[in-house]
Image: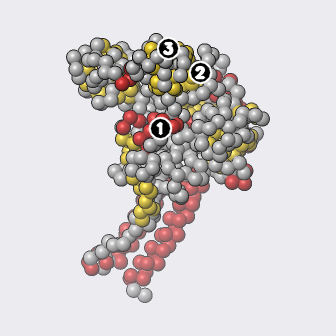
Amino acid sequence: MDARNIGIKIAFVVFLILAFLHATALSVIAETAYSLEISGDGVTKPLTLTLTELESMEQYQHVYSTINTWPTKKWYVARGVKLRDLLDLAGIKEEAQLIKFISKDGYEVTLTVKELLKDKRYFFPHLKDNHPNDGRIPGSAEDAVEVEPILALLSAEGSDNPDDMNDRDALLLIFGQRAVTEQTNHLFLKHVSKIEVLSAAPEKWDPPKASIPSGTVVPEGTMITLESKFDNEAKIYYTLDGSTPTVNSPMFNWSSSRWWSLRNNLESVNIPIELKEDVVIKAIVIGPGREDSEVVTFTYKVDRTGKTEDPTKVPGGPPTSITLDRSEIALPVGSSFQLEANVAPFNAVDQRIIWSSSNTSVATVDTEGLVTVVGEGIAIITAKTAIGGLEATCIVRGIGEKKRDNAIGELPVYPSSAERNSEEEMGISVGSEPADELISAEEVDEEIIVSNGEGKIPGRDGHWQHLENKREIGVQPSNANVLLVTGNDSSQIRVYEITLGSAHPIQWSARQKNLSFQIEVIILLLFITGVGKKYVEFLKEL
């Protein structure tokens, strides 16, 4: 038997040893991956629970109705531990107000104690009445069943059949809807590993704005749109009868702004309000992790004589003033905040704004007013009108605490709130983040990477955000498939499947092929004694 054959046999033995080490390491990881840490100043008894301990607790199983932010309706069936039971074990305090859920890869979802534990949440069995998928078309709220928020050990997205459940997304945060139209799917966080219960008071959402100032006399048929800079994170609810809007009222921004560049029918989804008679519009912003905004009132008088021009089509002259929605903000290093500038009059002929920072070592600002804190200290952000040079400023204080993830009010990476899609729609998977959100209705199987041809997908207001599947990258076989999405319009999107094959394997030189047997043995021994151990340690760190 020549040295080459001996080397091959030794390599085979090493392979078997590594396979054993891999299986052993995975068994360790299977236990530690499901450990759950509960901490924060809102609990009296911080604790860590293993998978075995979670499985030994009383299990709760139910079907959940949900809607994502495209929006699309769907079912989930899930089985797991009640969140109330977990928080009771940790001794949740009366003064606890916020609950932050953190996935294994650091993505966060923050909810208020009120919205998650005190507000009643339901499974709506008639969610799909009137339309099986379209989330803009409300189903019936009849026969609603109150359900518990849970961390699911087993779940199935897009199904109400318990036989479909698996542990792929465990621990999965999942809860019911407060209203049959409420969009909750983007908050279903996968692979939860930590829960932080906090006593800090939640902030309040900024109130919405209207496209035409309140009190304006308008011609019959004028269209009003309601706007919020938080169109991705929160929803605008409104009434036309003078009543106070709630989560059960009509919704304006059915589709979140992350999807606007992918739709050619936005005005048929987020439908403007047509003014046919004098009207009072009351509106509110409601979303996760904050208190509801103040209710704002917009009044309009409709002129049917035909003498009043549509103010949106009449040039308003040069800008007369500019204001910012914040005069001062304090943010940890690494976090961001979207400033909003308001130019008057609303129909000024030129509303271009020039943004600048007085100290770019503390804070930077892009052309859309997105402020990013890059260092400690103080910087002044200035918004200046392109015509007239009118200015408004905001003082930014950089705090020396590195943020782990986007806070509400920043411009998040999308779809980082990634919602899973119905079986007719394509999903985008980003690490352990919440369930996937759709961007088109293509017959596509599990994806690895989705992009628009440049490794990006459009985010809010034209900002382009990189997208990658953290779970998949780095462990792909040589023939892994990649999905590629092209087109900015929902009617023009195309999906391509690319195979990363090994059509041209690496050609080794004759000298490399004829390495001596002794060197091969030494390399193999080093691999077994050194790399093998490191391999197990590496797997434990995943």
Residue with the mark numbered 2: 239
Disc 1 designates what residue? 266
Are discs 3 and 2 less than 8 Å apart at CB? no
Q: Is 164 positioned to the left or the right of 542 in the image?
A: right
The image position of residue 174, as x and y in percent, is: 64, 38
Quadrant in the rendering for residue 401 = top left
Label 3 residue SS: strand
Residue 390, visible in the rendered structure? yes
Regarding residue 198, the answer to whether it shows in the image is no
User: Looking at numbered disc 1 in the image, what kind of residue is underneath it?
Assistant: Leu
Mark 3 is surrounded, within 10 Å at the Cα level, by few (under 14), some (14 to 19) or many (20 or more) other residues, namely some
Which residue does the image show at 61% across and 32% down from the upper left? 182
Mark before the other along the chain sequence, 3 or 2: 2
- Type of residue at label 2? Thr
**Looking at the picture, which amino acid does disc 3 mark?**
Lys
Marks 1 and 3, the one that precedes in the sequence: 1
Q: Residue at x 39, y 20 (%)?
A: 309
Report the residue that reaches farthest toward the bottom.
1
